[in-house]
Amino acid sequence: MKKIAVVLAGCGVFDGAEIHEAVMTLYAIQKNHASFEIFAPDMDQMHVINHLTGQVMPEKRNVLIEAARIARKNIRPLDQLNPDQFDAIILPGGFGVAKNLCSFATGGASMTVLPLLERILRDFHKQNKPIGALCISPVILAKLFPGAKVTIGKDPGTIKHVETMGARHQITSHGEVALDEENLIFSTPCYMLDANIVQIAEGAEHIVQAMLKKM
Amino acid sequence: MKKIAVVLAGCGVFDGAEIHEAVMTLYAIQKNHASFEIFAPDMDQMHVINHLTGQVMPEKRNVLIEAARIARKNIRPLDQLNPDQFDAIILPGGFGVAKNLCSFATGGASMTVLPLLERILRDFHKQNKPIGALCISPVILAKLFPGAKVTIGKDPGTIKHVETMGARHQITSHGEVALDEENLIFSTPCYMLDANIVQIAEGAEHIVQAMLKKM
């Protein structure tokens, strides 16, 4: 059975992992007869957003502890993710990716990637193991792998950033997967488009199925 | 298009709504060509649990604000739920149901139900509109509707509480739905069993489909 590492950026679209994308990714993996383990960095979130009002809350929350809500406790710190033990890695989206896993939310194309995550992704890449990214997560792959083909959907501003970082951008619609055969990089837009939850499930299933074919 | 009210008890299995059950319920509703609106009570959670360790955290969180993470902001306070405007109501599970929506976690069979939720559920019942409950949520229906047939899976201790409250309990396995034709009460065990996420999706889909047939 193929085993996929899932990396979460917290719990909630505005400051963490997008919950529907995360849950549908886990579902797609298991439904397609593969298994998963979930990881998140043990660090403070950039900030905490009140998801009712969109305002910053005067609180601190930890990415790993909050991501454990989605994982139902079955989660490990990101520094325990050993690429040798997995066939692939996948990153669901959410603003937390752009805030906690890299600095895209504040730095745009000048962003940096969390060094621990960078090391892990470069290791999967070196081992020719598929890397999947949903929603905004492909910006991380655009930064780390110059010339990679990715999609973040259709948003012109984000596409410009992705291209500035040296990636080739493919416009996609609901449920479509951009495949970079050479780098084994897979991406799908999910909530980067104005999507509904059925379309998110389709996107997650299509990217997981495409990745499984290359393992 | 049939419209179903979904009530969430927060965000996270140990102190709020069980996230997989909540997401799979929304997915099942939309996949089966119905629509949903999401509600949660505007009140403090009973407590906040660190989902990594299981320990209580010295924090306060609000049920509505946290549930908004699952709802992606598209949520309203429970006091705005007007049963006249919906064809059915459904409650995903999670310990938050037993802690925030009723006092089952501390009171067992002597529990009380959040008065606002009680009024809403009695109104749906009076209007002969289907009421669905996943996981631990059926305890609320056991309390409010004596003689109702419900399932919470197979756990002997919980079954005893349910029967003490005057309900008839039906033992069920993964994905099965207990149907009380007379009261139009539907229940399915989900994570009250040792389930995986594919089984949760099946349970959510089966209960939503069973409810839609009676609308």
Image (tube, coloured by chain):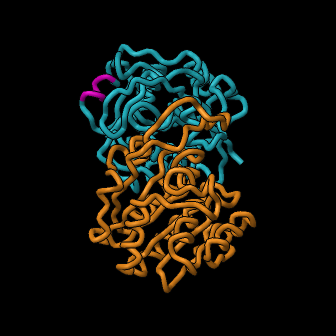
Chain colours: A orange, B cyan
Going 60% across and 45% down the picture, which residue do you hit? A14
- The stretch of residues the image draws in magenta is B157-161
Q: Residue furthest left?
A: B156
Q: Residue furthest front?
A: A110
Going 40% across and 52% down the picture, which residue do you hit? A40
Work out which quarter of the rendered image holds the C terminus of chain A and state it.
Answer: bottom left
Going 69% across and 69% down the picture, which residue do you hit? A159
Decide which of A193, B203 is in the foreground and name it.
Answer: A193
Decide which of A48, A85 is in the foreground and name it.
Answer: A48
The percent coordinates of residue A9 (x first, y second) are: 48, 51
Is-magenta flag for residue B158?
A: yes
Going 55% across and 35% down the picture, which residue do you hit? B67
The percent coordinates of residue A70 (x first, y second) are: 43, 46
Indicate left or right for B91 with B50 as reference.
Answer: right
Q: Is residue B28 visible?
A: no
Decide which of B5, B71 is in the foreground and name it.
Answer: B71
Indicate left or right for A91 with A111 as reference.
Answer: left
- Asked if residue A65 is positioned above or below residue A23 in the image, the reply reads above
Work out which quarter of the rendered image holds the N terminus of chain A and state it.
Answer: bottom left
The percent coordinates of residue B88 (x first, y second) are: 62, 36
Q: Residue furthest right?
A: A156
Q: Is residue A81 visible?
A: yes
Decide which of B103, A39 is in the foreground and name it.
Answer: A39
Q: How many labels, in total?
A: 0
The percent coordinates of residue A101 (x first, y second) are: 49, 55
Indicate left or right for A145 with A31 as reference.
Answer: right
Magenta span: predominant SS is: helix
